[in-house]
Amino acid sequence: MKIITINLPEKYLAAIQVLNDLGVYPSRSEAIRCALKDFLGNELIMFNNLEEETFKMLVRNTADNRR
């Protein structure tokens, strides 16, 4: 695993800490990993089913259309 640094709103961090304190997740890092896994689920399925360059093109086009 790689270590990254992220900035979170205080409210998000507080919610993650509550989940950690309640024992829902063993650590804040695990809670964030689970959230990212859920978020990226569909994108990862698409990535695995497409060639890497095709996936990059689709993501780039989607990002451009949101601007």
Image (cartoon, rainbow, N blue to C red):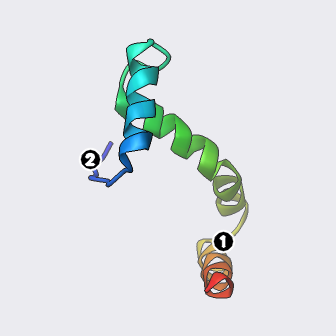
Q: Is residue 10 above or below residue 26?
A: below
**Mark 2: which secondary structure?**
loop
Disc 2 to disc 1, C-alpha distance: 27 Å
Q: Residue at x 46, y 38 (%)?
A: 33
Amino acid type, mark 1 = Glu
Question: For this rendering, which residue is in front, 1 or 23?
Answer: 23
Tell whether label 1 touches label 2 (CB within 8 Å): no
Residue drawn at x 63%, y 54% is: 44
Q: Nearer the viewer, mark 2 or mark 1?
A: 2
Label 1 packing within 10 angstroms: few (<14), some (14-19), many (20+): few
Tag of residue 3: 2
Give the residue pinned by disc 1: 51
User: Is residue 30 something one can see in this rendering?
Assistant: no
Q: Earlier in the sequence, mark 2 or mark 1?
A: 2
The amino acid type found where label 2 is placed reads: Ile
Q: Quadrant of the N terminus?
A: top left
Frontmost residue, 49 versus 42: 42
Which mark is on residue 29? none
Residue 6 position (above or below residue 53): above
